[in-house]
């Protein structure tokens, strides 16, 4: 039973604040007046809407289809009427909007017809597609589509499947409560994943401040009789629940940034994900609700089973928010995201609604200059030198920040937590990262533009050549004619300018017409998306694309050059 | 706009600096016990000058004065200046040195956290180059009473040659050099015999060795408080001991013993309080070892072969120059990129 | 043997051409903004200076002095060094275009770099023989490169410092150079010890 | 005097020969630097720099004929990068060449467009599609925002619209330096 555990560098021990929200069992939430379900909830492209205003939907009905394989579907979390499909404020620091489906519940919470899958008979690929359409994503917070992670590495099998029940963030207890109350179902989900990944061992890592959860899981393992599954207590130290850190603690393997953990024979899933996989495979229920801890500045911190799309303040009301509440934080105090409003919806990433107040989370003392004391480096679980990255981030010297491995930073917040100068280090790193990404996008755009520009020059060059050849041929023909007929060339020379005049007159006429149109009905036809226009555009686009590959098809005569 | 994390450990620059100051107290107490209370006057002068200089610069730059004057970093600089300067230098010398340190070496670079050089040591170097005579007069333990010290600090009269000698380090070196030359009356005397003289104690200079011991205690407390790490003191003492030991074992009559080197001059102050300044010192673990070992070797070389009595200050500045490169080249491998 | 060692050590540290003799400040301030260019400039200068010291010694001893025209020394040295710099420039342009562009105006500046003329003249003044001249030239240029690289390291870091506006850039670099010079005074007397 | 002249002439001849040999031996073809400069330029091909496109401007910079601060779409950031690459001092954007604007794309008011194709010819990156007498439209993804199509349009039906921020392009802001607030 005694397993050798490994250590990761750094880490901090903030006050856990987990006791109060674990005193009461998981509670349901009464249906709210409306649900706002963002379509873009996971990593990958935004799903496209499958419903329209006025549609009747059932619980579990797919309302957003996965956009390609690197995406995940979205479902109606209750039965009701689609009131709108519109951009709504999403639970994200930016306060920006995203296309969302607004559902008015009919109060019946009726499941639609569920498409079941025969887990025993289905091939792994079918299971993965099924999970994609069931909208199962990582519930630890990263919301990475699970079906993408359920592929064994190159060898077709996996050494270790790590199940993350560490839950290292202070205040959050939803995984704890899930393990206490639903360990058996969770274990069934784990078995399914183990089967899909062909994993030899399963290690469930649980921080040692959750003895009840550990006991429940161990009891469930014994009851199931399955071999090779082990629930392990790991030392409580933030961020032991980070996937990389947990893998390190349990197996000793360090998965570098930018590499897949399956390359090292390990894969890691959250306990909540395991449970929702079980729900999907066993009962055919897609991911329409999740456990959410409501904690912080509330009278009765507790865990709730919340429908995706429920406004956060609707849930918080149940726990009794205190009057000095000034913000909601999605997630824990170390990595949580400040919400732009109180009524943003609960999404698949919402493991906790942390209710904040100036007294509970006071603003940090004024930022002082870095004194290079190295506390942040001592606390960094990724072995980085945050003070160096900060120094160059502050000076906007992004090349240097990357030399110090900026992108290995997991934004756990340990450095900001310990900094005696109260520097918001992680903010600097987030700033640098997004600036670097923006720059990469610009660089890509510039490269495309260069390519297209060079192609256009090439095309024009060739056209000029072709025109010259044509002219030469024509001239030769004319010369022959002239030689033969000895007619006056005056007519020919006069014809040319008159042709130009005619063209100019045409443009003039068209402009006049346009001016009138503009004066009369300018706004009428602005939003042009009629099918035939689109078809025409597509045809034009296709022609242009054909022109880009001159070897395959000859370029069309350039428009407007008579 | 506040983003995560929303909770923080109670820690501040102020408390770090305060603990450094507290750790200096035993050393200061020993200093007062053996060399008189004049040092307290010097500490006060230096502190006042540092605060005044800092306040003036902050005012010019439009930075919040209350925040930066109470961070205590200027006081740390001031105390290190007072403790490394001879205790009887005239007041204007202490003031000039402190102002140079705070205004030029620290604030011109942007103030706290930005200076590439150790302000106190830069001030020491500037002053010893500018006023070599004044900066080399060290009273022996118990030689001067408080009133004489005050006279020397504030009075204009400087017939100090009559009442003060050189530091044990300086005296030893002068003696060793003249002992090595054939036409000196000291010719042929061994280092151990020279060190029986009145200025020398059991290990280093009389009294000075006890002050060094007190610094060592304070420094160990800082390590225990996790304000500094063991790397720099250990590497410095180790390298100084080894370098001195090597030459001493080859020619014990020409070179002082390693213990003497450790207990003399600013060795202990340097190892625990000067080189450990995180702003101007190396920050990676391997970098700290290199940095401190380099400083130790340079200190020894300057002490034994150079033109100045103690090498700590110059060695610190020289190693400060190397710090950016050392830090750059000694970065520890990050998570997932370690070679097992 | 040890005397040769002292020549090198003296040239690198004790009488550092930049920080103690205060020669060659132009490239020292100009090409020290980035570490890699500083390394390149150091290498180029080392090459030019060592070669220049050797050549100038030969010309001095086998042409100028026998011909009795040692009063032309400065003139001749300038011409020789200018030519060596030109060749170096051509070689660098061929082998490392970016380095060439980066060194930009500084490469021709080696010609007028007082260090490059100063060191051969010092060689004459110090009565060095050929080997000593070469070593002295090499040592001086290593000393130059060393402080140039270290200085560039500090300046790269200073780039992020909150230096008061009037002191940004060259001004604070000058202050830094001064403090480095102060630090190098610690080496004083080392070459006198025997 | 004669000796002196002879000596100097001798030295000069010798060195001259050496230099001449080196200049032939180490002759450099082309200039790889232009590529590096071109890679920094934003490739809008807008011509605001006074050169007919980004590459000609890069050539001009490499040849020392143009300043590095003539590219408004590249902005301060671009100037900084060029200064870095070339080891020159940073200069603020030269005003005669334009000002830095938020990134925009051209949008054709399709009700007004008369299909004259003038903008299609003006577009340096072929981001406008359409045929004669038919309404044109702009492929937003390929539009570089160079504004070259604005002037030729006879009916002024093209406007520049700033690109709206989305969650994917949203950027974390520079953390506010709080010392100033505490003062």
Image (tube, grey):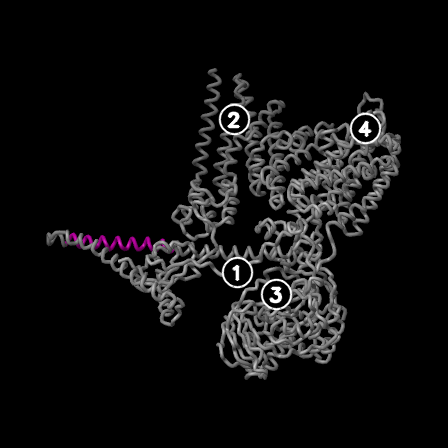
Residue C10's label in the rendered image is none
Is the residue A502 above or below the residue B287 in the image? below
Front-most of residues B338 and B63: B63
Nearer the observer, disc 3 or disc 1?
3
Q: Dot 3: what SS?
A: loop
Q: What residue did someone put label 3 on?
A: A339
On the question of residue A523 being in view, the answer is yes
Q: What residue did someone put label 2 on?
A: C78
Residue C66 x, y percent position in the rendering = 54, 18
Is the residue B197 above or below the residue C67 in the image? below
Crowdedness near tag 2: few (<14), some (14–19) or many (≥20) residues, C-alpha within 10 Å: some
Cα–Cα span, label 1 and label 4? 70 Å
User: Total number of numbered labels?
Assistant: 4
Q: Dot 1: what SS?
A: loop
* Horizontal relation, residue D61 to residue A233: left or right: left
Cα–Cα span, label 3 and label 1? 18 Å
Span highlighted in magenta in the image: A455-480
Crowdedness near tag 3: few (<14), some (14–19) or many (≥20) residues, C-alpha within 10 Å: many
Cα–Cα span, label 4 and label 3? 67 Å
Can you say which quadrant of the picture contains the N terminus of chain B?
A: bottom right
- Same subunit, labels 3 and 2: the answer reads no
Q: What residue did someone put label 1 on?
A: D169
């Amino acid at each position: 039973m005694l397993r050798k555990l490994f250590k990761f560098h750094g880490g901090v021990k903030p006050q856990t604040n987990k006791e109060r929200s674990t005193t009461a069992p998981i509670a349901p939430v009464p249906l709210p007046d409306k649900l706002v379900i963002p379509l873009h909830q996971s990593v990958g492209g935004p799903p496209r809407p499958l419903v329209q205003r006025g549609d009747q939907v059932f619980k579990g009905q797919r309302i957003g289809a996965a956009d390609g394989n690197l995406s995940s579907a979205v479902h109606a979390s209750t039965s009701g009427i689609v009131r709108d499909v519109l951009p709504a404020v999403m639970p994200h620091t930016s306060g920006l909007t995203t296309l969302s489906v607004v559902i008015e519940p009919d109060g019946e919470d009726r499941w639609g017809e569920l498409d079941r899958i025969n887990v025993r008979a289905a091939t792994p690929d079918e299971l993965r597609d099924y999970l994609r359409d069931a909208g199962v994503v990582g519930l630890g917070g990263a919301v990475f589509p699970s079906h993408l992670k359920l592929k064994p590495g190159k060898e077709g099998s996996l050494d270790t499947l790590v199940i993350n029940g560490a839950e290292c963030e202070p205040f959050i207890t939803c995984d704890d409560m899930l393990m206490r109350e639903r360990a058996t179902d969770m274990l069934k989900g784990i078995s399914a994943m183990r089967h899909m990944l062909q994993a030899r061992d399963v290690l469930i890592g649980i921080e040692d401040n959750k003895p009840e959860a550990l006991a429940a899981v161990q009891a469930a393992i014994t009851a199931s009789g399955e071999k090779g599954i082990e629930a392990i207590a790991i030392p409580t130290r933030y961020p032991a629940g980070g996937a990389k850190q947990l893998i390190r603690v349990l197996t000793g393997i360090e998965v570098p940034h930018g590499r897949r953990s399956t390359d090292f024979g390990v894969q890691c899933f959250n306990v909540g994900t395991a449970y929702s996989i079980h729900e999907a495979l066993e009962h055919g229920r897609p991911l329409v609700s999740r456990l959410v801890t409501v904690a912080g500045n509330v009278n009765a911190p507790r865990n709730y089973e919340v429908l995706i799309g429920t406004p956060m303040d609707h849930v918080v009301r149940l726990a009794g928010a205190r009057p000095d509440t000034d913000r909601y934080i999605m997630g824990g105090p170390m990595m949580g995201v400040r919400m732009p409003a109180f009524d943003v919806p609960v999404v698949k990433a919402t493991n906790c609604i942390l209710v904040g107040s100036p007294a509970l989370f006071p603003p940090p003392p004024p930022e002082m200059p870095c004194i290079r004391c190295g506390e942040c480096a001592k606390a960094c679980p990724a072995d980085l030198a945050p003070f160096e990255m900060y120094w160059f981030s502050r000076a906007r010297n992004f090349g240097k920040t990357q030399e110090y491995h900026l992108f290995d930073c997991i934004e756990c917040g340990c450095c900001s937590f310990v900094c005696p100068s109260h520097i918001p280090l992680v903010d600097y790193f987030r700033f640098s990262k997004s600036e670097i990404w923006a720059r990469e996008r610009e660089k890509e755009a510039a490269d495309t533009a260069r390519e297209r520009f060079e192609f256009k020059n090439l095309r024009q060059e060739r056209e000029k050549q072709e025109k010259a050849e044509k002219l030469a041929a024509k001239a030769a023909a004319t010369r022959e004619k002239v030689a033969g007929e000895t007619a006056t060339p005056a007519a020919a020379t006069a014809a040319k300018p008159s042709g130009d005049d005619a063209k100019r007159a045409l443009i003039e006429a068209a402009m006049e017409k346009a001016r009138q149109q503009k004066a009369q009905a300018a706004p009428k036809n602005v939003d042009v998306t009629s099918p035939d226009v689109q078809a025409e555009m597509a045809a034009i686009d296709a022609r242009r694309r054909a022109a880009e590959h001159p070897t395959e098809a000859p370029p069309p005569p350039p428009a407007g050059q008579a | 706009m506040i983003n995560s994390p929303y909770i923080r450990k109670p820690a501040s620059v102020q408390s770090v600096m305060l603990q450094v100051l507290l750790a200096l107290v035993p050393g200061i107490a020993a200093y007062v016990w053996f060399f008189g209370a004049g040092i307290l006057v010097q500490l006060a002068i230096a502190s006042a000058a540092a605060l005044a200089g800092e306040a003036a610069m902050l005012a010019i730059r439009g930075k919040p004065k209350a925040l930066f004057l109470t961070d205590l970093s200027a006081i740390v600089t001031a105390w290190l200046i007072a403790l490394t300067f001879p205790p009887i230098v005239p007041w204007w010398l202490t003031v000039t040195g402190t102002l140079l340190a705070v205004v030029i070496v620290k604030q011109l670079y942007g103030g706290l956290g930005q200076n590439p050089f150790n302000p106190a040591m830069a001030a020491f170097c500037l002053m010893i180059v500018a006023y070599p005579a004044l900066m080399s007069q060290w009273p022996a333990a118990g030689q001067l009473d408080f009133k004489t010290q005050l006279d020397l600090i504030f009075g204009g009269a400087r017939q100090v040659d009559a009442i003060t000698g050189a530091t044990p380090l300086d005296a030893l070196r002068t003696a060793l050099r003249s002992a090595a030359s054939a036409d000196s009356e000291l010719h042929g005397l061994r280092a151990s015999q020279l060190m029986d003289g009145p200025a020398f104690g059991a290990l280093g200079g009389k009294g000075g060795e006890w002050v060094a011991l007190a610094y060592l205690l304070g420094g160990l407390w800082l390590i225990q408080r996790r304000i500094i790490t063991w790397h720099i003191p250990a590497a410095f003492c180790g390298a100084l001991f080894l370098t001195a030991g090597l030459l001493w074992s080859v020619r014990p009559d020409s070179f002082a013993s390693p213990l003497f080197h450790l207990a003399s001059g600013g060795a202990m102050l340097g190892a625990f309080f000067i080189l450990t300044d995180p702003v101007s010192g190396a920050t990676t673990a391997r970098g700290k070892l290199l940095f401190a070992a380099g400083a130790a070797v340079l200190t020894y070389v300057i002490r034994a072969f150079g033109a100045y009595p103690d090498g700590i200050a110059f060695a610190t500045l020289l190693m400060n120059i190397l710090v950016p490169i050392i830090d750059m080249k000694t970065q520890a491998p990050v998570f997932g990129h370690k070679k097992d | 043997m040890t005397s040769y060692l002292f020549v090198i050590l003296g040239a690198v540290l004790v009488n550092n051409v930049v920080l103690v003799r205060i020669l060659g400040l132009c490239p020292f301030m100009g090409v020290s903004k980035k570490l890699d260019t500083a390394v390149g400039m150091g290498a180029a200068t080392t090459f030019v200076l060592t070669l220049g010291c050797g050549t100038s010694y030969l010309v001095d001893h086998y042409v100028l002095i026998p011909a009795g025209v040692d009063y032309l020394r400065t003139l001749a040295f300038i011409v020789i060094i200018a030519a060596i710099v030109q060749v170096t420039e051509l070689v660098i342009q061929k082998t490392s275009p970016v380095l060439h562009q980066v060194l930009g105006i500084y490469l021709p500046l080696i010609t007028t770099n007082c260090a490059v003329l100063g060191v051969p003249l010092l060689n004459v003044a110090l009565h060095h023989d050929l080997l000593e001249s070469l070593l002295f030239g090499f040592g001086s240029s290593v000393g130059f490169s060393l402080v140039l690289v270290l200085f560039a390291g500090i300046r790269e870091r200073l780039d992020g410092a909150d230096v008061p506006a009037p002191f940004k850039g060259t001004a604070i670099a000058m202050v830094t150079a001064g403090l480095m010079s102060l630090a190098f005074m610690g080496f004083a007397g080392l070459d006198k010890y025997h | 005097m004669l000796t002196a002249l002879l000596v100097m002439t001798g030295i000069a001849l010798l060195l001259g020969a050496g230099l001449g040999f080196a200049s032939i031996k180490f002759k450099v073809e082309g200039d790889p630097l232009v590529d590096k400069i071109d890679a920094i330029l934003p490739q809008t091909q807008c011509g605001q720099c006074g050169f007919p496109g980004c590459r000609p401007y890069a050539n001009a910079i490499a040849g020392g004929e143009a300043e590095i601060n003539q590219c408004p779409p590249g902005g301060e950031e671009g100037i900084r990068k060029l200064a870095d690459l070339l080891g020159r001092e940073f200069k603020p954007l030269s005003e005669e060449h334009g000002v830095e604007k938020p990134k925009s794309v051209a949008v054709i008011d399709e009700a007004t467009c008369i299909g004259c194709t003038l903008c299609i010819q003006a577009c340096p990156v072929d981001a406008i599609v359409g045929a004669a007498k038919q309404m044109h439209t702009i492929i937003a993804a390929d539009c570089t925002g160079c504004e070259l199509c604005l002037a030729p349009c006879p009916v002024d039906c093209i406007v520049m619209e700033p690109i709206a921020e989305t969650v994917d392009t949203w950027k974390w802001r520079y953390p506010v330096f709080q010392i100033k607030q505490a003062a």
